[in-house]
Amino acid sequence: MAGLISMLEDGNKNGVFDVEDCAKTAHTLFFATIRYHHPLHASEWSNTTIKDDFNHLFTLLEKALHKQK
């Protein structure tokens, strides 16, 4: 989780992200994506839509984090 916090902090410093609380946001991102990294969900990883599902989720999260112009 520390790596994700660091990434969010760097994004804030560089003007890419607009995140108020990097630790809470990292925690939220971790659990929002749990389906894609927790071993309990391994049986889902062979699902034919898993890549599309992840890409849609990632796009949504990325848009939410980016600083508005």
Image (tube, helix red, strand yellow):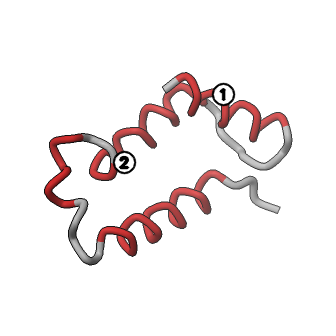
In the picture, the quarter occupied by the C terminus is bottom right
Q: Please rate how many residues cluster around mark 2, counting C-alpha atoms within 10 Å: few if below 14, some from 14 to 19, many from 20.
A: few
**Residue linked to disc 1:** 6
Residue depicted at 83% across the width and 34% down the height: 13
User: Which residue is at the far top?
Assistant: 2
Classify mark 1: helix, strand or loop: helix
Q: Position of residue 31 (x, y in %)?
A: 34, 40
Query: Is 67 on the left-hand or right-hand side of 33?
Result: right
User: Which residue is at the far front?
Assistant: 46
Query: Is 43 on the left-hand or right-hand side of 27?
Result: left
Residue depicted at 54% across the width and 25% down the height: 23
Query: Is 45 on the left-hand or right-hand side of 17?
Result: left
The amino acid at mark 1 is Ser
Residue depicted at 85% across the width and 41% down the height: 14
Classify mark 2: helix, strand or loop: helix
Nearer mark to the viewer, of 2 and 1: 1
Q: Please report whichever mark, 2 or 1, sits nearer to the chain's N-terminal start.
A: 1
Of 62 and 41, nearer the camera is 41
**Residue linked to disc 2:** 32
Query: Is 14 on the left-hand or right-hand side of 61?
Result: right
Figure disc tally: 2
Q: Position of residue 1 (x, y in %)?
A: 48, 26
Tell me if residue 1 comes above or below residue 50 in the rendering.
above
Of 48 and 6, nearer the camera is 48
Q: Position of residue 42 (x, y in %)?
A: 19, 51
Q: Are the residues at dot 2 and dot 1 in contact (C-beta closer than 8 Å)?
A: no
Q: Position of residue 44 (x, y in %)?
A: 18, 60
Residue 14 bears which disc, if any?
A: none
Q: Please rate how many residues cluster around mark 1, counting C-alpha atoms within 10 Å: few if below 14, some from 14 to 19, many from 20.
A: some
The amino acid at mark 2 is Ala
As measured in the structure, the alpha-carbon distance from the residue carrying label 2 to the one carrying label 1 is: 18 Å
Residue depicted at 22% across the width and 66% down the height: 46
